[in-house]
Image (cartoon, rainbow, N blue to C red):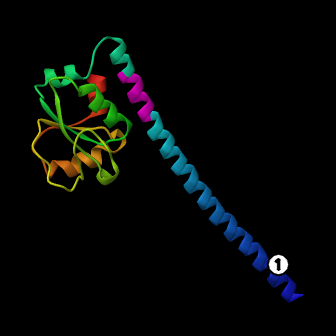
Amino acid sequence: MKKGISALLGMAAGAAAGGIAAGTSSSKKIKEMAEVHAKVHELYMAFDQWLQIRQEGKTLVEYFTRNDYKTVAVYGMKELGERLCDELRGSDITVSYAIDQNADAIYADVDVVMPDDELAPVDVIVVTAITYFDEIEEKLCEKVDCPIVSLEDILYEM
């Protein structure tokens, strides 16, 4: 009888531990999904704001001209970074280079360097990885003397 109770208690403890582990795993998954959702929502809102600007007949070139930024480095070459380069192409604003952690895997019309590489002087660095702006700005401030701005801030200043 003691063996049966011990076995039953062991199974109950195992089930409880498994439930806790599954709950922890489930909580972690939910947290990861919430972070992805927040990031996608930020991206969506940025593109929406950009579209509103374009529908008003304006372009981001106006921001750079108004601030006397002639040379730009673009940090982050995913969707927002690519669109920014496209928007500035053919204007008086030169995208001197891009910065991306995956520089070796990116094909672009401009040179793409790693964040740890030496960064050539430019008038401004625009961070298109808007979710991570604060961390990126903190790291870049140690390396450059130019302003570092978030694309999100540019979009809402227009």
Q: Amino acid at mark 1?
A: Leu
Residue toward you, 67 or 17: 67
Question: What residue do we see at 23% from left, 27% from top?
Answer: 89
Quarter in which the N terminus is drawn = bottom right
Residue toward you, 60 or 9: 60
- Give percent across and percent down for residue 154: 26, 27
- Give percent across and percent down for residue 104: 30, 54
Quarter in which the C terminus is drawn = top left
Magenta segment, which residues?
42-50
Q: Could you say whether the residue bearing mark 1 is in a helix, strand or loop?
A: helix
Question: What residue do we see at 33% from left, 17% from top?
Answer: 53
Magenta stretch encompasses residue 47? yes
Does 98 appear above or below 42? below
Does 10 appear above or below 119? below
Determine crowd level at label 1: few under 14, some 14-19, many 20+ residues with C-alpha closer than 10 A: few
The residue that disc 1 covers is 8
Residue toward you, 69 or 38: 69
Question: What residue do we see at 26% from left, 47% from top?
Answer: 136
Magenta stretch encompasses residue 98? no
Question: What residue do we see at 47% from left, 37% from top?
Answer: 40
Q: Quadrant of residue 46?
A: top left
> Given the current orientation, which residue lies at the most extreme right position?
1
- Give percent across and percent down for residue 98: 23, 42
Left or right placement of residue 22 versus residue 153 in this view: right
Does 123 appear above or below 9? above
> Given the current orientation, which residue lies at the most extreme bottom position?
2
Left or right placement of residue 156 versus residue 2 in this view: left
Total marks placed: 1
- Give percent across and percent down for residue 48: 42, 23
Secondary structure predominantly adopted by residues drawn in magenta: helix
